[in-house]
């Protein structure tokens, strides 16, 4: 783990919107951090957020205090965390995931909210538009416009796939948006998407098993429920020689075959820089445009390729960065 997550409970001392004097007489800020579930991508995003804040002059333990809460993928807990931050009047809420951001917005229309790891900020009702967010919310999206289309092009152009399976939680708006994008990208390719939905992480293994014999590959988007139980998908894939494509690079490092993605620490860093502008410079979230990831690359896991029966092609050398899993 990149950081320690506290159990749900009271948010401690009341945060002061007027600030407190810290080291050197500088104003200190309290940032409430709400994260829907533990998994490497979200953890990396928070680490990036703290670095972004620190590089902007807001260092943990010096002039910023983080109160970190994890909902463990429970909707009720997720909202309770947000309500507690609103009641304690923290100076800013950092919402790490779509459900976290939605709960935060439901809890307060006054406290600034900066999100990351959100796939569809407009469709999920967080902002009015990418360029002009409006309200008290802004942040960074974890959707690079070319990530899904490039993945589908790679599948269609480099393999003889016909049916591609996917597993997602239909209750996550970010996942539903990505599934729509996959279907749009598959038009005219001959690829067919085979969908399996789950409501919690305990259902992921059975969903993966149900795809065996029906699909040539599996594509897991940035669904928090499924990614938190990603090893269940990998177990089935490894045992049945089914290549697994992922929506982010951390899942490749965990054992997926390939992904077009970016570093979640980078979008967390961008969000941290936004938060610093709000806290230090007095800027309003409404006036800070939502940002997308700035870098995209193809990462291939050589170890996973061998386990899943994928032969690496020489022409991929100029397209991809390779990773060997230990």
Image (cartoon, grey):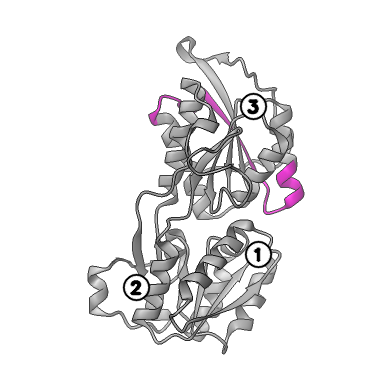
Residue behind mark 3: 90
Asked if the residue under mark 1 is in contact with the one under mark 3, i.e. CB atoms within 8 Å, the reply is no
| Foreground label between 2 and 3 | 3
Looking at the image, is mark 2 or mark 3 earlier in the sequence?
3
Between marks 3 and 1 in the image, the one whose residue lies nearer the viewer: 1
- Say the numbered circle drawn on residue 265: none
Q: Where is residue 224 in the image (x, y as percent from the top left)?
A: 59, 58
**Nearer the viewer's eye, disc 2 or disc 1?**
1
316 to the left or right of 220: left
The residue closer to the viewer here, 16 or 107, is: 107
Residue identifier under label 2: 302
x and y, in percent, of residue 231 in the image: 55, 69
Q: Which residue is drawn at 58% across and 16% down?
A: 19
Query: At numbered mark 1, what does the secondary structure look like: helix, strand or loop?
Result: loop
Mark closer to the chain start, 3 or 1? 3
Gap between marks 2 and 3, in whole Å? Answer: 45 Å
SS class of the residue under badge 3? loop
Real-space Cα distance between discs 3 and 1? Answer: 31 Å
Q: Position of residue 235 (x, y in %)?
A: 54, 76
Is 159 placed left or right of 81 in the picture?
Answer: left
The answer to whether residue 173 of the structure is visible from this angle is: yes
In the image, is 273 to the left or to the right of 200? left
Residue 169: assigned label: 1
Q: How crowded is mark 2: few (under 14 residues within 10 Å), some or many (20 or more)?
A: many
Q: Is mark 2 on a helix, strand or loop?
A: helix
| Label 3: how many Cα within 10 Å (few below 14, some 14–19, many 20+) | many
Of pointers 2 and 1, the one earlier in the residue sequence: 1
Q: In which quarter of the view is residue 9 placed?
A: top right
From the viewer's side, name the closer residue of 72 and 141: 141
Q: Give the range drawn in magenta.
A: 55-79
């Amino acid at each position: 783990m990149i950081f320690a997550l506290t159990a749900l409970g009271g948010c401690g001392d009341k945060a002061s919107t007027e600030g407190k004097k810290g080291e050197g007489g500088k104003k200190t800020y309290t940032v409430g951090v709400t994260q829907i579930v533990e998994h490497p991508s979200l953890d990396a995003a928070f680490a990036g957020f703290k670095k972004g804040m620190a590089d902007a002059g807001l260092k943990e333990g010096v002039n910023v205090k983080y109160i970190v809460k994890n909902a463990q993928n429970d909707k009720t807990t997720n909202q309770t965390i947000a309500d507690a931050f609103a009641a304690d009047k923290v100076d800013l809420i950092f919402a790490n995931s779509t459900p976290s951001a939605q709960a935060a917005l439901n809890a307060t229309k006054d406290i600034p909210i900066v999100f990351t790891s959100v796939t569809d900020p407009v469709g999920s009702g967080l902002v009015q538009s990418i360029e002009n967010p409006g309200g008290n919310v802004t942040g960074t999206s974890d959707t690079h416009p070319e990530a899904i289309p490039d993945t589908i092009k790679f599948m269609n152009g480099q393999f003889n796939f016909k049916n591609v399976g996917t597993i997602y939680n239909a209750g996550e708006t970010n996942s539903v948006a990505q599934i729509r994008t996959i279907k749009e990208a598959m038009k005219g390719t001959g690829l067919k998407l085979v969908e399996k939905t789950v409501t919690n992480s305990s259902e992921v293994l059975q969903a993966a098993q149900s795809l065996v014999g029906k699909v040539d590959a599996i594509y897991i988007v940035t669904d928090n429920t499924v990614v938190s139980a990603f090893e269940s998908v990998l177990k089935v894939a490894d045992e049945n020689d089914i290549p697994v494509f992922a929506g982010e690079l951390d899942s490749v490092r965990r054992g997926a075959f390939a992904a077009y993605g970016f570093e979640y620490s980078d979008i967390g860093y961008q969000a941290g820089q936004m938060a610093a502008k709000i806290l230090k410079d007095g800027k309003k979230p409404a006036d800070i445009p939502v940002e997308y990831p700035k870098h995209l690359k193809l990462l291939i896991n050589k170890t996973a390729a061998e386990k899943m029966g994928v032969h690496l092609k020489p022409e991929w050398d100029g397209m991809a960065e390779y990773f060997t899993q230990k």
